[in-house]
Image (cartoon, grey):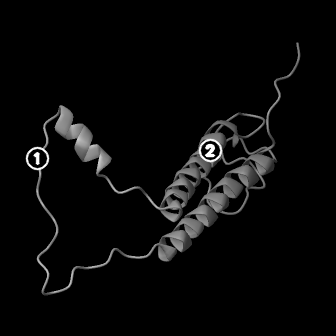
Amino acid sequence: MQKKRYIAPKTSRALMLGGWALGFLLLLAAWALACTIPPEPLPAPDEPPAAEIVIVTGGAGADAAAQDAKPRAPAEIACYTCVALAVAAMAAGGIQAFFFYRCPACRSSLLWYRGLFPAHCPHCGKPL
């Protein structure tokens, strides 16, 4: 019978931290992109506001309201894309660690261990 293959605990921990670091860097990139988006101009004090409240319940009016929507700027799309990629990278790192950051001997999870990396498994005591 062949032994099951697994990822070494140190490799799994490094992958988890790498995913979280990549997610953090992507969030920083999204923040930098958000800072480059110019704000919408405010109306002059003597002009009446151009905003109207329109309630559209469906039909042809809903299609017309959808066509009046302002297209998003490329920087705004890139910002949302960076946030989505950051969430995906952080989730992938966490999910990978949940399934693979385990003791090779007893297969118990090492996620809740405090510190950089345990020398021995806190559950069975065997060296890692």
* Relative side of 48 to 4, left or right: left
Residue at 16% x, 69% y is 50
Q: Residue at x 64, y 36 (%)?
A: 99
Outermost residue toward the bottom? 45
What secondary structure is marked by label 2? Answer: helix
Which residue is at 15% across, 87% downward? 45
Q: Is residue 60 left or right of residue 101?
A: left
Marker count (numbered): 2
Task: Give the secondary structure at mark 1.
Answer: loop
Badge 1 amino acid: Ile
Residue 37 circle label: none
Q: Position of residue 71 (x, y in %)?
A: 40, 55
Residue assigned mark 1 = 55
Which mark sits nearer the N-terminus, 1 or 2?
1
Q: Residues within 10 Å of mark 2 (few under 14, many from 20)?
A: some
In the rendered image, which residue does mark 2 sit on?
Answer: 92
Which quadrant is home to the N terminus?
Answer: top right
Q: Position of residue 75 (x, y in %)?
A: 53, 64
Residue situated in front as seen by the camera: 54 or 126: 54
Q: Quadrant of residue 60?
A: top left
- Asked whether, in this view, residue 16 is left or right of residue 7, the answer is left
